[in-house]
Image: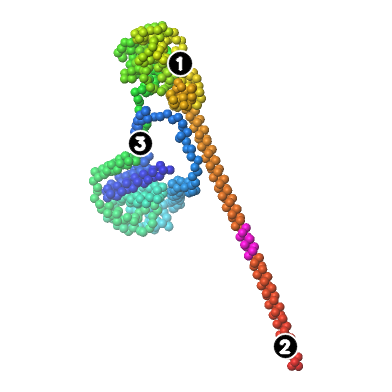
Amino acid sequence: MENLLIYLLKVNGLLLFFWIFYKLLLQKETFYKYNRFYFLGSIVLSFVFPLIYFTKIEEIIIPASNLKTVEDISNFVLNSTEIIETNWYDNINWLLISLAIVGMISIIKIGIRIFKINQLVRSIKSFENHPTEKNIKITDDNQQVYSFYKWMVLPKQLFNNENISVLIAHENIHIKQKHSFDLVYIGLVNDLFWFNPIIKLIRKDINLNLEFLVDEEIIKQENSYKYQKTLLNFNQNIETDLLTNAFNSSDLKKRILMLNSKKSNPMKKLKIALTAPVLLAFFGLFQIETIAQVKQETQKNDFITENQIILELLQKDIKPIQEDKKVYNEIIENYKTTIDGKELSQKDLQEFDHSKIKSVAVDFTNSEKGTLINFITTGEVEDRIFSFGIDQSVEAKVHIDGNAVDVKDLINQSNHVPEITSYEKILIDGKESSFEELQSFYNKNIPFKAERENDIIIIETRKSNKKDNKLSSKNKPLYIIDDKEVDSSDLGKISPNEIKNITVLKDDESIKKYGEKGKNGVLIIQTKEYEKKELEEKRKALNERKKAEIESKKALAESKRAEIESKKALAESKRAEIETKKALAESKKALIESKKAERERQKALADAKKTVELQHNSTQSIL
């Protein structure tokens, strides 16, 4: 809704700008046709420009060191159980209601406008036809000449007027130039933005400019003085329909002034170019969307990113390189490549017969020179030889022979001799050897597995060790996938695309959390599916809690309502009791009054009898 409100403000702001520009720079010029299309075009552009956006992308580079593994996603879930009570009116979207009211009024006004247009057309069609002109309608009721669409309406009393030809010519120009379209167009815009008073001023200026257009055409056919006199004679203070072009006008003074004005220099049309700076400022301030593109800074030891191609190609064997020229070309284009240890030109590398490759040696040890690829064409066994730097600190997985293996673990089974500072002895395939023999052996580029146990350096060639590429069970870390302990063989079942994050725990931290099982380190993997399930569970729990809160509030409201009803019933009961007591009191009072009246009556009756007896006695005594 905020977007709709902003759009409406932009449209009305542009309409205001275009109207002010017209009043300041174009109103006094005499190129009326140009001004007509200025009005029509500026209204269309006011609606269109706010819909046009330009995108500006700003890259935000976040150092990889700033990215941390989230171990407990529950920290992002609101744990507070505090219930905040709000008033009913706080939850009402007043902006939505306001826009709905404005929209309803606009729709009603547009509906009324369409109804009036239909009513006007039906009314014109019902008038009597002119004897010779099909587009002229004759009326007895109307006192003014006007036109709409393809019809002209003339009052019957004006048929014998000496200026009737001028009146007809005037309205014919309105019809020919289709001025009714302009009036209907601005009328609908006025109904849509009924709350903007500027639209009414724009409509008035559009109507007046149409009259300027007609006046300019008329004086090409008629005498200017005679036409101005006709305008004065027919200047009637009669309210005109906003949908029609009427001959009489309330702006007669302006029309006569423009008729007598000097023609404007056509070069002044270039004033329209002055709108450009304002429109550019409008787009610069309001129509540029800035999109932040977050990128992770690539570190020198970003192992997986830099070596993704070669790691994916050599997951199982070297056949893709031997059989597919495209795969071979992709490698030589992305990595520094040698053939049997010899550097060749790029042209020679491209012409090399890749099917002759027997083994591939991949050297990751030199971070400055990057990954080095050596294609070996000698030997009987097709193999892959990986050499990792002993100081490699990458915490990531690669797939070797279908197994997902941590890079640190590959270090222990790669063609790289463990760092030798002090040692007791060196064993090559179980045979004790000297350091010089070790160096000589290493320079032969024979695939081998190297590890260090205490102060003993153990070298096993791949011919003697059939179980290469397997992790040492002695120093095997603990693997946790989605909070479940798994074997290293289960790592190969997970696709790298399914992994959300990997966390490595070492030393005291791993022992503290997992006990003796974690003494060789812990590799914790959380999959995207598990995260989704976990989030879904938390979302369900949160929804259930909210539902319980709503039910609790509802029950509380019902309780309060029942309490209010109870108090109300009690009040009614007390009121009824008071009314009963009051009625009883009234009854008692009435009884007392009745008894009192009875006593008064008895007394009056007794007095009457006494009076009668006295009169009777008096009469007897006289007799």
Considering depth in this image, is 573 or 182 the residue closer to the camera? Answer: 573
In the picture, which quadrant includes the N terminus?
top left
Image point 66% across, 70% down: which residue?
A: 590
Q: Determine which of the numbered discs, if any, sits on residue 472 in the image.
A: 1
Dividing the picture into quadrants, the one containing residue 232 is bottom left
Residue kind at label 3, given as amino acid type: Thr
Secondary element under disc 1, as helix, strand or loop, is loop
* Mark 2 vs 3, N-terminal side: 3
**Residue holding disc 3:** 290
Q: Is residue 6 above or below residue 588?
A: above
Q: Tell me the CA gap for discs 1 and 3.
A: 52 Å
Instruction: Mark 1 or mark 2: name the one nearer the start of the chain.
Output: 1
Per the image, is 566 magenta?
no
> Viewer-proximal residue, 474 or 192?
474
- Sequence-first tag of 1 and 3: 3
Q: Quadrant of the C terminus?
A: bottom right
Secondary structure beneath label 2? helix
Q: Are marks 1 and 2 in contact (CB under 8 Å)?
A: no
Q: Position of residue 190 (x, y in %)?
A: 39, 49
**Given the image, on which type of amino acid does mark 2 rest?**
Gln
**Stretch in magenta:** 573-582
Residue at x 46% of width, y 22% of height: 519
449 shown above or below 86: above
Q: Which mark is residue 615?
A: 2
Element type at mark 3: strand
Q: Local crowd at mark 1 within 10 Å, few (<14), some, or many (≥20)?
A: some
Q: CA distance from mark 1 to mark 2?
A: 149 Å
Whether residue 620 is visible, yes or no, is: yes
